[in-house]
Image (cartoon, rainbow, N blue to C red):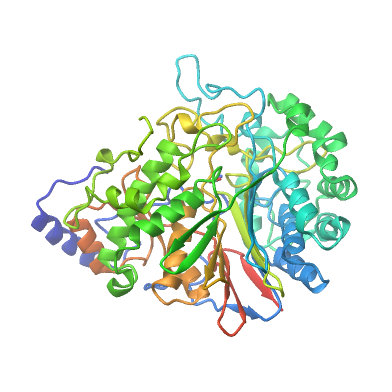
Amino acid sequence: MKRKTLSLQCAIILFCIVLSACRTGPQQPGLRQSTGMYQYDNETKSVGVRKTGPYYSDRQAVTGKNGMVASAHPEASRVGVDMLKAGGNAVDAAVAVQFALAVVYPGAGNVGGGGFMVYRDRSGQAYTLDFREKGPEKAQKDMYLDSAGNVIPSLSITGHLASGVPGSVDGMVEAHRRFGKLSWAQVLQPAIDLAEKGVVLTEREALGLNRTKKSFLAVNPDKRYFMKPDTTDWKTGELLIQTDLGQVLRRIQAQGRAGFYEGETARLLVAEMQRGGGIITENDLKNYHAIWRDPLVGTYRNYKIITMPPTSSGGVALLQLLRLVEPYPLRKWGWNSDSTVQVMIEAERRVYADRAKFLGDPDFVKVPVQELIDRNYLKNRWADFSFDRATDSKNVKGGNLPGYESLETTHFSVVDKDGNAVAITTTLNGGYGSRVVVGGAGFLMNNEMDDFSIKPGVPNMFGLIGNQANAVAPGKRMLSSMTPTIVEQEGKLYMVVGTPGGSTIITSVFQTILNVLDHGMTMQQSVNALKFHHQWLPDKTTFENGAFSDETIRKLQARGYILEQLTNSLGRMDCILFRPDGTLEGASDPRADNTSVGY
Ligand code: GLY
């Protein structure tokens, strides 16, 4: 729909007439309605009755004194707490949760994907681990273009060429080697049990698998995986048994990283690639290593933010966003008032433009991290902003830095009794990744290659565009938006936050932090709160039904903001807050199966 060029007065009158006439219909007139480009593949239906006002639901928090795990699946959270009760620390629990999610939540949990971990130990020392997938050694800059230079549809999204070299298993091996207390065998065992004895399908997972069946069949000749023997639809409550995945997990349990990157699992993975025209080789697997990176640390007001540096753009973008809005009285203006939303949208517009211009794998391109989060630089980014009118994204470019030329992921949070805290976001990229199941091994491969900029200016599946900094190259990690983050208050652990959602991860984390720090919400209220998103291009603000009052909508539209109401939801937050009385508040998202378990 093209933007209308009505005079301001006419636009307001027209909007009000249409709004009141259609109040009861599903679509708010004057607004575009969309399932959104960010729709999760296994999005099924809204959970419970959606209220208008700030909250998606009135779900209550889970509390605990000794430990808390918040993840996308009740079984995975239970596994994590079992590890804590057995004397394990937050890292033991996190490793067990990562492997459990690979079994119980195949849409995003994984051994065939990658991710990022932020870890803050009880003394306040912070660490970040990058286990993002890498471009295979045979990857080429133009590998997703035809001879005329046009993008070949879906090639970076579905099938064997879509996969990067997986990083999750090495990431977990590294995290456990450095910080684990329980034995490796012990943290792997629950996932093995779940794979071999079976997991009871939730309604959401059953629907997700049914909706993906067609594409599973298209790329996998072997119908054993994620399918019933007669290929009829799954029903809620049926048991998904994954024997081959159980064997993979047993090899990882017995041999550590060699159980995945060498030997039988590697052989099966490479054979699968050769069968389907993929390019991942034995060498790629052998050479994959997770990397410990210096945490990205900054302040927002008097809070310390510990977050993920590149290869994720998430941490840089989050700090930019927080610092861009810092000078404004958001608390006084109120949650999602027109001024609050306007300033947040304009910050997001500028930050995503910077993301496209500057961000990429720091092992391949120089990423000006400190320059991008510098408060003077950010102050200048407001130079063309006016409260009277939306800035046009066409006129916004990545900033000028001195010296510079010019759905599906999952997150979980763990806190143990000693106050060690882990935030991990991990992914196959789209729901069920590339849909390629490794024959004989039963695990899904990622489609993370789509997170590269496959051609300058061409949007990826999340509508994000990129440039040279994020071009495809062998051995290079593709840029991410994952934003696992830990917040400190006066030197003490305060919040552990994160979410899936592709490009919307950054803005969901941003809002979830502001809801607590500026709008006085509890952690659960903040997770429940309705959300919105802007990413520079396309130049529009998408929002969950009810996120904006009629007044906010009217005022923003009068200033030229293009608003699009989503029929799906934003975020699947799994967060933990350390309350002043020492209680842990586990806040999992009511938008899906996410569950917190504490003790
Ligand atoms: N695959 C989504 C992300 O890494 O941002």
Q: Residue furthest bottom?
A: 581
| 41 lies left or right of 544 | right
Quarter holding residue 310? top right
Counting from the top left corner in percent of width and height, residue 147 is at: 49, 14
Foreground residue among 65 and 408: 65
Looking at the rendered image, the quarter that the C terminus falls into is bottom right
Question: From where the camera sits, is residue 365 visible?
Answer: yes
Counting from the top left corner in percent of width and height, residue 10 is at: 10, 56
Counting from the top left corner in percent of width and height, residue 124 is at: 62, 66
| 560 lies left or right of 220 | left
Foreground residue among 466 and 106: 466
Counting from the top left corner in percent of width and height, residue 480 is at: 54, 44
Looking at the rendered image, the quarter that the N terminus falls into is top left
* Residue at point 53%, 25% (across, down): 144
* Residue at point 68%, 81% (across, down): 65
Q: Residue furthest right?
A: 254
Ligand 1: which quarter?
Answer: top right
Q: Residue furthest top?
A: 147
Position of residue 31 relative to residue 58, above or below, is above
How many dots with numbers? Answer: 0
Quarter holding residue 544? bottom left
Position of residue 581 relative to residue 217, above or below, is below
* Residue at point 32%, 64% (across, down): 25
Question: From where the camera sits, is residue 45 visible?
Answer: no
* Residue at point 26%, 51% (across, down): 382
Quarter holding residue 101? bottom right
